[in-house]
Amino acid sequence: MMKTLCIMILCATLVVGCVTAPVDPHQKTIASLDDSIYALSAAIDVVVDTLPPDSRDDQIISVVTAKDPSLTAPFAGYTLKAEIQDGTGVILLCDKDAHVAYIEDVTCTPRIDTLRPTGSPCLFFLDVKKVCTEIQRNK
């Protein structure tokens, strides 16, 4: 009887724990924009060598949207930041007020590099040189 009661309490605890596990409220947003970030990242990667190394934000994004304005359409209502670090483009997607970051991506990689947890500030954090070196090492 005691064994059955303990098993029931354990099962109830596990079920309640799974049901109430916190879910990132931005997960749906992040998932819906992954492909669009990837396309923008690839376009920036193509032109980054033609830009001055201190180019930022609209200076970078305007070059790629001049060729394909649809690249930024999915990000209406968000803030897109971009910069060049060590000759590599980096993109940061933030909320419309540029307070909270959702996605940060380095253009040297074939995938999204980091999905930021809720509450992350809208600042670049990735070590671009380290990320690109790891990609080269794993080829």
Image: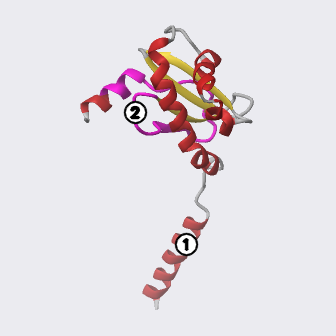
Type of amino acid at the residue the image marks with label 1: Val
Question: What kind of colouring is applied to the model shown?
Answer: secondary structure
User: Is residue 30 inside the magenta stretch?
Assistant: no
User: Is residue 113 inside the magenta stretch?
Assistant: yes
Residue at image coords 46%, 25%: 45
Q: Secondary structure at mark 1?
A: helix
Q: Which residue is mark 1?
A: 15
Q: Which residues are magenta?
A: 107-133
Residue 130 pos. (x, y %): 35, 25
User: Within the image, what quadrant is residue 117 found in?
Assistant: top right
User: Within the image, what quadrant is residue 71 found in?
Assistant: top right
Above/below status of 30 relative to 80: below
Q: Nearer the viewer, residue 105 or 60?
A: 60
Residue 9 pos. (x, y %): 52, 78
Disc 1 crowd rating (10 Å Cα; few below 14, some 14-19, many 20+) is few
The prevailing secondary structure element of the residues shown in magenta is: loop
The label shown at residue 109 is 2
- Left/right placement of residue 49 relative to residue 139 reads right
Q: Secondary structure at mark 2?
A: loop
Q: Nearer the viewer, residue 132 or 6?
A: 132
Type of amino acid at the residue the image marks with label 2: Thr
Residue 15 pos. (x, y %): 55, 72
